[in-house]
């Protein structure tokens, strides 16, 4: 049975882990969002979130985006490669509906997975 939880082990927690991803990542983007990814050797995908106050002023708006990204990742983690993924919120994400955000994230997870496989084979 697939694991569909979001425990501490599947989160990026330290600045070193984030910096590892920011150094020559694979990128995939959509309106108001960007996914950065880099292979890891943990045996499972891990997620980090960057939703700055400069992009979404109110905590309620930032929390909505983070909640939707975590949920999408939680449901998709079995199909994702062993990689560290960082979600970056960009200006305009506040205008994206929950449904459109979820659909965009599903597409971005697939694009990121494809790009990581391609990078491994080269």
Image (spheres, grey):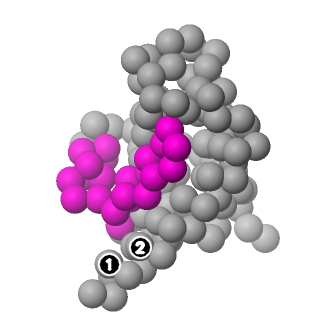
- Residue 75 seen by the camera: yes
Quadrant of the rendered structure where residue 100 is? top right
Are the residues flagged by discs 1 and 2 in contact, CB closer than 8 Å? yes
Residue at x 76% of width, y 43% of height: 99
Q: Position of residue 60 (x, y in %)?
A: 64, 15
Residue at x 28% of width, y 37% of height: 15
Horizontally, residue 110 falls left or right of residue 20, namely right
For the C terminus, which image quadrant?
A: bottom left
Horizontally, residue 84 falls left or right of residue 31, namely left
- The magenta segment is 17-39
Q: Position of residue 49 (x, y in %)?
A: 47, 38
> Label for residue 1?
none
Residue at x 40% of width, y 73% of height: 116
Residue carrying label 2: 115
Residue at x 57% of width, y 14% of height: 59
Q: Position of residue 97 (x, y in %)?
A: 71, 35
Residue carrying label 1: 119
Image: 109 above or below 6: below
Horizontally, residue 2 falls left or right of residue 18, namely right
């Amino acid at each position: 049975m697939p694991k569909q939880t979001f425990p501490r082990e599947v989160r990026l927690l330290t600045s070193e882990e984030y910096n590892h991803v920011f150094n020559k990542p694979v990128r995939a983007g959509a309106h108001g969002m960007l996914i950065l990814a880099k292979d890891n050797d943990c045996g499972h995908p891990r997620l980090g979130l960057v939703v700055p106050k400069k992009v979404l002023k109110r905590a309620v708006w930032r929390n909505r985006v983070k909640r939707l990204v975590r949920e999408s990742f939680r449901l998709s983690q079995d199909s994702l490669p062993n990689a560290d993924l960082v979600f970056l919120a960009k200006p305009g994400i506040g205008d994206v509906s929950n449904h459109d955000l979820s659909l965009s994230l599903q597409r971005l997870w697939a694009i990121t997975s494809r790009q990581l496989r391609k990078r491994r084979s080269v």
